[in-house]
Amino acid sequence: MRYIIIGAGAVGGTIGGRLAGAGRDVVLVARGAHHTALQEKGLRLHVPEGELTYHVPVADGPAALGELRADDVLILAVKTQDSEAALDTWGPAPVAGGGTAAERLPLLCAQNGVESQRIALRRFTHVYGVCVWLPSAHIEPGVVSAAGSPLTGILHLGRYPHGTDATAHRIAEDLEAAKFEAPVVPDVTRWQYAKLLTNLGNSLDAVAGSEGAAALREEVRAEGEAVLKAAGIDCTGKDEELALRGDKITLVPLPGAPRGGGSSWQSLARGTGSIEADYLNGEIALLGRLHDVPTPLNTLLQRLANEFARERREAGSLPVDELLRLVAFVQES
């Protein structure tokens, strides 16, 4: 198998680098300055054992690779707001022996939220969901850091919308040779919805930082839990998650690594102009409207995160007092 990592940022770069380190065939797909840095200097992966550099093929799209191989695996690791463009680009790519990537190749959605795999299933025949527990960061072109030890991450995977197959097990074997735990499960969305609840705090970190708003974080999560219950959506509980994770992933301080935050914080720090809030807090807002459950806090965070991204405001720059004033206003409205 050859792994084509579409979006070699924090998650994609870490998965690609670890697979390359385990001797697997990898192609990294990136754009702009990140693409240039990867081509010129290789992928610099900062991990607990040091800085590792991987010189692997780099592409900016399928045309750079020519005809795709029949044993290629596509790992989609862009932010969800970039999924449609990526899928439109890679879906029609020809595969050796006939047919297209969308018709023949497995596509793994290694992303936050639950929407991207639904978008993918409109175009691709063989779609797999991945629940990503992978503390990682990408701020500087060509550089990715992943602080987890002894495992780099835990990646539940399975066919979407449900089921397992031999391909999922083969991919899991490669991931487990690359410092990941990769349980193959028939109900991957149960794990993804639980991860979604955790990710609802991403926008909070992005706009106001991680200090001083712990109680608000719990209120935001409680809204999400109420919405999932009203929608009849099953997800794993905290005890089930903790029992599986145990002490398999401990964060190790990495010398020289920049101060960081979650994926949304990183989008603001890089000044990308977009953020994934529509598919995290916005997913809860959507379900709340469908099932008549108020979601004022998630709706507020979705709006603020999009404003910060659009205006390219500094990550974490909203004073907590100001945020709490806005929260009080929407709760009273």
Image: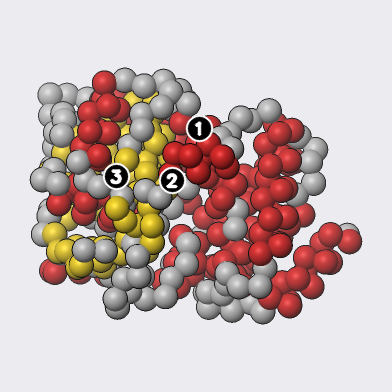
Q: Quadrant of the C terminus?
A: bottom right
Front-lying residue, 225 or 231: 225
Image x and y of residue 210, in percent: 57, 69
Left or right: where does residue 108 sit relative to residue 246? left
Vertical position of residue 25 compared to residue 42: above or below: above
The Cα–Cα distance between marks 3 and 1, rounded to whole angstroms, is 19 Å
Q: Within the image, what quadrant is residue 120 found in?
A: top left
Viewer-nearest of discs 3 and 2: 2
Residue 147 visible (yes or no):
yes
The residue identified by callout 1 is 189
The residue identified by callout 3 is 180
Viewer-nearest of discs 1 and 2: 2
- At label 3, counting other C-alpha atoms closer than 10 Å, the crowd grade (few under 14, some 14-19, many 20 or more) is many
Q: Residue at horizontal 63%, vertical 49%?
A: 282
Among numbered discs 3 and 2, the one appearing first in the sequence: 3
Amino acid type at circle 3 is Phe
The Cα–Cα distance between marks 3 and 2, rounded to whole angstroms, is 14 Å
